Image: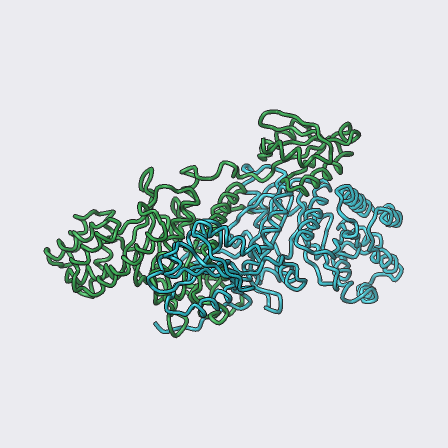
Chain colours: A cyan, B green
Amino acid sequence: MPTINARLPKGMRDFLPAEVIKRQYVIDVITDIFQTFGFEPIYTPVLEMRETLMGKYGADAEKLIFHAQHPGGKEALALRYDLTVPLARYTAMHEHDLTFPFRRYHIAPVWRAERPQKGRYREFFQCDVDIVGVASMAADAEIVSVLVTALQRLGFADFTVHLNNRKILTGIGLYAGVPQTQLSELYRSIDKLDKIGLAGVERELAAVGLAADAIERMMALLQWREGGVETLGQVREQLAGVVPAQEGITELEQMLEHLAAMGIPMEHITVDLAMVRGLGYYTGPIYETIITKPENLGSVTGGGRYDQLLGLFRRESLPTTGSSFGIERIIGLMERLNLYPPELSGTVVQVLVTVFHAGTQSASLALANELRAGGVRTEAYMNPKRSLGKQIQYADRKGAQVVAFLGDDELAAGVVKFKRLSDGHEVVSSRADAVQTVRALLGG
Amino acid sequence: MPTINARLPKGMRDFLPAEVIKRQYVIDVITDIFQTFGFEPIYTPVLEMRETLMGKYGADAEKLIFHAQHPGGKEALALRYDLTVPLARYTAMHEHDLTFPFRRYHIAPVWRAERPQKGRYREFFQCDVDIVGVASMAADAEIVSVLVTALQRLGFADFTVHLNNRKILTGIGLYAGVPQTQLSELYRSIDKLDKIGLAGVERELAAVGLAADAIERMMALLQWREGGVETLGQVREQLAGVVPAQEGITELEQMLEHLAAMGIPMEHITVDLAMVRGLGYYTGPIYETIITKPENLGSVTGGGRYDQLLGLFRRESLPTTGSSFGIERIIGLMERLNLYPPELSGTVVQVLVTVFHAGTQSASLALANELRAGGVRTEAYMNPKRSLGKQIQYADRKGAQVVAFLGDDELAAGVVKFKRLSDGHEVVSSRADAVQTVRALLGG
């Protein structure tokens, strides 16, 4: 058969073993925190009916969805684009098998045919945690609490969860006299605040015809980026009589009260009335986490309340709130900020059992199995023609810390010789004590 | 937005939380054994270039491959059909970043548009473990060793690994005078032995024109289903002078020697000269595991040596041997044979913190976080309008073993009341001792 060129689809990645081990570490830490908070895992297939996904993400996003079909197949399928629409479908299909409130997490790849660029891929993992069936702000506070706890457990020290509420944004628009039809342009401009600055936002709003005094009144509100219920009281006064704003402020106050009572360190929380989060389906609280040191490293979580979305596939919606962890970005930052625990070397093998000659190969395999039965991660070398020196080099490349020698002399004496590679320390041990001896060498 | 019917593609599955937890348990056990044997994980994307997969599986299988593309996309893509061709592509692309021998495992879903039927799905998990770069039978013995160890660890007691060697099958064909061009028909007939019986195989071979005495000589060989090197000696004598058969027997003998030395219980091993395993790319040893009690429950692993396949995407191949675990079938049998550990209830939540009224919601959330900080998997109830009775019912449905009460009296006294649901046992504890108290209740 002629060899063909091995290549990957655009924007897609293989991972080497050391990378897989590190990615799995992050997933395991987050999974553990999710379960500690009482969230349960779900699984949905990669392929969905195409009609399940269409009309949910807007025309531009829809172009990025990968279609799938098998030759002669009648079903028009698609690879999932996120984990939220599948959650809505799943909840509708299994509502009689689920207990509500339904607290679920889901960590799985999604596909988007975006233009590949540094740090952006066409197959990437999403990590979502949501509470379905609770309208109370207690649920939103729990989501923020799980975000903070997971980031802390991963080793992040300097981050801020920005809180806002879609109802306040709507209220600010009403307060400034922005017509209903122009609210989305208002949001889009505010969303660009970090990029174009206050002056830029002012210019954009003037360009769409907003009165200068309305813009000015809004600008003061948008600069509000502080925590604490006291400051919110001033916003409440300023937006007196604006019903959605009053509702949104009450919700924010409730969240902040819960968070304070729960012992969430308030230096991690800030109210940011200019935070928009693309909006789309959000209906109440929205939250986003920024890594702040050694510099602003961007957003690592984003979420909020979306009380209407679960109604996509059932007669009545269910109040729902939740957040995504930007797990790909988190994995990148773990490396950059050196947050992996030192013992997570990315290698598997702890001990390499060498082989002296073909006649002792079986004995080497047997020793390897004895060490494995004791829980030691062991590889047996399988080419007796290579010198012991080369075998030790191989052990080093594989990341093994200890090498075992079992030649004819050791076999005759019923012993095994171990050597620790870091310092060359050697120990001769009886076979019966082999596991114990290795453990001591690995620990020392 | 009008609601649309929530449905899944044909042959694809959602999993409820309890199912995900059990599947993950099986994956975790197998992963742990793989790592103990020094195998490393890899990750490859779900989508491959279509050309990578085409021409590798035969025309019938190829029809089952799902094609994928995004609207306007130029790349013809496909969902992976197995984990073996991706391994060949991966090894070719990353050979300079890998250390050989390369011992890898890969547990991931694959897609095949087969006609859905009971126990057969279009998206299902495969679990492969392979050693790339070792020609020695030591590698094949290690693969059998890892199969046996993993099945034992999962709790399977009654299973047999059937061993054969493709070279012996070729030798038997030569010995019986089957022309090279009819060898594949011979294999196909032998493969049906379990279904059509010896008489059926005889009839089929006669129909393709094999001489009666040739068939008779073969039949005696094919009935050989025993372990041990002694019996193989007799086969060796009978096939004296048939070069491939002699080679295959030597390989089998070497494997059996290694396995015996490694302490693999020989009651789990049998030589089965009629075992064919679809053949295709196999070049030497082949192995398959059958669960034997309470009845023949079919095959749960299958594999062998395929020394040519890794040459698909590189100039020279690499000798490779490995096996698949039929993880979907194993998961089904775990349930049927009741092999899950009793503590794996399929539920996450250990403690439910109830809520008395809206004014104590924050306090309940705070208690939940205290228990979580102590490693207790805790859910906080969030609807203060529901009676405590209903909340306890909910705790029971969620599988929580302990319920916590924190009303105004408890708050005033700085205590919390816990109740174990199984026996109604109640304990009042100080807040400081809450984690310890819960641990005792959960353990008792």
- Residue A325's image quarter? bottom right
Residue B236 locus on image (x, y percent): 19, 58
**Which quadrant would the N terminus of chain A be assigned to in this image?**
bottom left
Q: Is residue B308 left or right of residue B127?
A: left
Residue at 59% from the left image edge and 35% from the top image edge: B398
**Which quadrant would the C terminus of chain A be assigned to in this image?**
bottom right
Residue B222 locus on image (x, y percent): 20, 52
Q: Is residue A226 left or right of residue B273?
A: right
Q: Nearer the viewer, residue A284 or A15?
A: A15
Residue B123 seen from this side: no
Residue A430 locus on image (x, y percent): 44, 52
Residue at 74% from the left image edge and 48% from the top image edge: A285
Q: Nearer the viewer, residue A168 or A431?
A: A431
Residue at 32% from the left image edge and 49% from the top image edge: B161
Q: Nearer the viewer, residue A178 or A332?
A: A332
Residue A335 seen from this side: yes
Q: Is residue A42 left or right of residue B140?
A: right
Q: How many marks?
A: 0
- Residue B182's image quarter? bottom left
Q: Nearer the viewer, residue B406 or A103?
A: B406
Residue A399 locus on image (x, y percent): 52, 63
Q: Is residue B244 above or below residue A231?
A: below
